[in-house]
Amino acid sequence: MHIKPHHSESWRSILQVRNELITQAGGISQEQTILSSSVKNGKLHLHLAYDQFRNKENSVAWTKGVWHRAVLPKHSFFMVLAMQRLLATIDKLNHKGICIINRCILCNEACETHRHLFFRCPFAAAVWNRILDWMQLPGRINDVRIELRWIAGRRVRRH
């Protein structure tokens, strides 16, 4: 099917993406191969077709500790933002001219940066330490990436 001017904007977008996927796959015959490998029991499964196109080599080790059925999705999303240093900390807001405060609202001792918020703030450190004590876990949190590697290496036990 070709894209026509009378098609809705959303349908034109879908057809455009389809055309790009066909080009990326190497033509119509390759598209049919991908589609046929995405059919199970006579039904097309989009996740199987999607898996044919996505780059699986770019996954990172910490995702297993973040995206887990025992973790609430909003907490997982927050951790993804934290891992990518995309949280709206005061230093980033000041840089964009959005915020005029220059101190951490938890301790009022230093500028709120990602590193300060998670590891340098005395208030946050006290919270982390109490959680670790409550969970009877050794050590103290120093770096979120190290902690997530540790979490990803552990398995959640079912009782």
Image: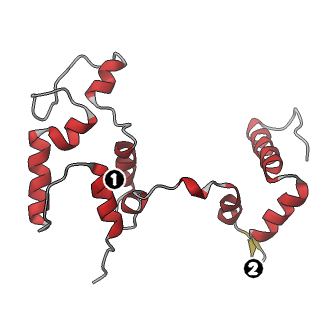
Disc 2 crowd, CA 10 A, few/some/many (<14, 14-19, 20+)? few
What sort of colour scheme is used for the picture? secondary structure
Residue at 12% from the left image edge and 46% from the top image edge: 125
Height in image: 60 above or below 116? Answer: below
Do labels 1 and 2 touch, CB within 8 Å? no
Residue at 14% from the left image edge and 27% from the top image edge: 110
Q: In terms of depth relative to the viewer, which is nearer, 60 or 70?
A: 60
Instruction: Identify residue type, mark 1.
Output: His
Q: Position of residue 25 (x, y in %)?
A: 80, 53
**Is residue 98 in view from this perspective?**
no
Q: Which residue is mark 1?
A: 75
Residue at 32% from the left image edge and 51% from the top image edge: 145
Q: Position of residue 117 (x, y in %)?
A: 21, 38
Quarter of image, res 129: bottom left
The local secondary structure at tag 1 comes to helix
The local secondary structure at tag 2 comes to loop
Height in image: 145 above or below 13? Answer: below
Height in image: 124 above or below 70? Answer: above
Q: Is residue 120 left or right of residue 149?
A: left
Q: CA distance from mark 1 to mark 2?
A: 36 Å
Q: Which residue is mark 2?
A: 41
